Amino acid sequence: MTDTGLPNRPETPRAGSLGERGGKSAGVPHGSDPGSRGHTTIADGVVAKIAGLAARDVPGVHAMGGGFARGMGAMRERVPGAGGKSVTSGVKVEVGEVQTAVDLELVVEYGVSIMEVAGDVRENVIAAIERMTGLEVVEVNIAVGDVHLFDEDEDKDEERPERRLE
């Protein structure tokens, strides 16, 4: 036997050997929590997308974002290859290791109860983020920046002849 000068080390399983042992590796207790074997980070953009989609799912929410953000979004939708509608428009998040806070800017439909829509948005956003990420949502702040009037869409869709004063 030749001495290589290396201290005695226990053999570590090779990459293909986990399946041969039924998924258990030598030296790891059977009841060990898999969550303690690594670290998961969730990007701010992921939480913002979840919040934006969850907010838009609530009846009474017409759009998200301020006037400038909506205008830029409308331009982006018309440009081929620009990525289309942004689901994070009107959403700001702060993500920590175990908690997150969300700020939303909404445009609601005319005639709905703003307080009810805001409450429903808050509930839906909290449920979606906590279910999908495991983060604790400490606050969801909602700013209603506009009310959408149904005749605003008709004005944009129909081309009206120019009125002339006689």
Image (tube, helix red, strand yellow):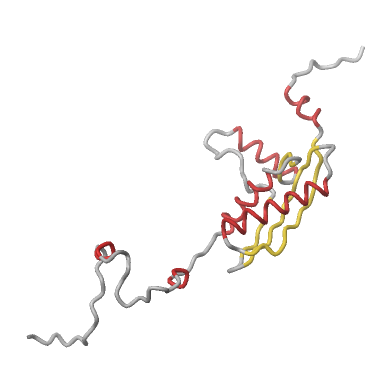
Where in the figure is residue 13, as x and y percent of width and height? 25, 71
- Whether 132 is drawn above or below 38: the answer is above
State the residue in front, 56 or 148: 56
Kindly identify the residue that appears in the image at 55 percent across and 59 percent down. 43
The answer to whether 88 is drawn above or below residue 40 in the figure is above
Residue at (21, 86) in percent of width and height = 8
Pick the quarter of the image with the N terminus.
bottom left
Q: Relative to residue 25, is residue 163 drawn left or right?
A: right
Q: Residue at x 24, y 81 (%)?
A: 10
Give the x, y percent position of residue 50: 61, 51
Residue 151 coordinates in the image, percent (x, y): 81, 28
Residue 68 occupies quadrant: top right
Q: Quadrant of the C terminus?
A: top right
Q: Is residue 17 left or right of residue 128?
A: left
Q: Work out whether 117 lies above or below 27.
A: above
Q: How many numbered discs, if any?
A: 0
Relative side of 165 to 29, left or right: right
Residue sitting at 76 percent across and 43 percent down?
107
* Quarter where residue 154 is shown: top right
Q: Residue furthest left?
A: 1
- The extreme right residue here reads 166
Return the residue found at the far top.
Answer: 166
Residue 151 vs 39, above or below: the answer is above
Q: Nearer the viewer, residue 4 or 23?
A: 23
